[in-house]
Amino acid sequence: MRVAASLLCALLALTACVKEEGRAEVLRSVLVRIVRLGSADSLNVYSGEVRAHVEADLGFRVSGKMVERRVKLGDQVRRGQILARLDPQDIALSASAARAQVAAAEADLKLANVEYERVKQLASRDFVSASVVDQRHTVLLAAQSRLKQAQAQASVAGNQTGYANLIADGDGKVTAVFAEAGQIIAAGQPVMRLTRGDGMEVQIYVPEKRIAAVKLGASVLVRPWTDPNVALLGKVTEVGAAADAATRTFPVRVAVQGDGLALGATAAVVFPGAAAARVVLPNGAVIARNGGSVVWIVGRDGRLTQRSVDVAALREDGVVIARGLADGDQVVVVGAHTLAAGMKVKALPETQAVSLDSAR
């Protein structure tokens, strides 16, 4: 009897627990987005490449075979330093041929001058006509012109002997190399890139629908990707007047103050003045009520409260909220029109899939 009584008591207790669990409140799951006023949704952020303020692609002024490159990537160079050399043999032969042409032109001029003086003496004795004198004078003038032409060509050929050396036109740093020794180089073909000066800039590209908000002299923040915690002051120095034909974006250059950026590195340029306190929410998060716009906020206790917000714009990617939200607010982003104030819900991140609630 005692065993039966104990089993009966245990059965009654288990039944009571099941009933108590059945009375537990079933919470509705909702997707929420946590407001971050300093995120990329509330700021105009563009990534770009760190470049020097002054940079130039250097190349030879004549064509030929490059026989030597005296500097390598990353080297510091001085003004007047020889960076690379072409094979000077063909250039020297051209200069020698030009000097030979000058010598020939000088000889022709000397002969023309002698003949002209002789004809003048004969004409004074009436041995030749005046037309012969004119012809010899014309030959003399032509010889003088040919000499000037040959001298000019010799000067050009002489200069080209110096063009066989690629010389740095200023102090700087080699940031790119495009050719190696043994390569045939055309005149003007880039051989290396030289950056000059200490100024650093970030080259970004701004979409055409936002370029109107970018002004010369505007202050921005620059954050290197290698260390997002570093924030450098920058200023817009150049705004492209024409969009790129392929990307339909405008080039913009931002001068950076201070150190911390490496040439060729990636950096983010932040324009805080464009929309410093704005948040973008999905269309389903905002509902119209009493002539205004409201959203549902999930409190720390899990209960819903209604909050009025100011809508700044409607975009393809959502609704831009200008005012009404604070950093850290949990905003319901789906099914806002089906909720009621005071309802207790289970908040889930919007990236997490919500399973169907069997109780509903």
Image: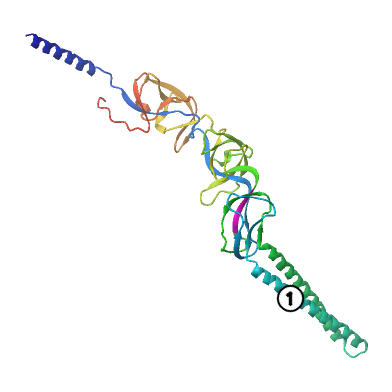
Residue found 48% across the figure and 25% down from its top: 327
Residue 205 horizontal/vertical position (percent): 54, 44
Magenta stretch holds residue 176: no
Residue 205 at least partly seen: no
Q: Is residue 334 left or right of residue 243?
A: left
x then y, percent, for residue 144: 80, 75
Q: Quadrant of residue 339?
A: top left
Looking at the image, the residue that sits furthest to the left is 1
Residue sitting at the far top: 2
Vertical placement of residue 335 versus 134, above or below: above
Q: Is residue 170 left or right of residue 298?
A: right
In which quadrant of the rendered image does the C terminus lie? top left
The residue singled out by tag 1 in the image is: 101
Depicted 330 relative to depicted 16: above or below: below
Give the magenta-colored segment's residue range.
Answer: 190-195
Could you tell whether 343 is left or right of 197 in the image? left
Question: Which residue appears at 77% of the width and 76% of the height?
Answer: 103
Amino acid at pointer 1: Gln
Compared with 137, 53 (above or below) is above
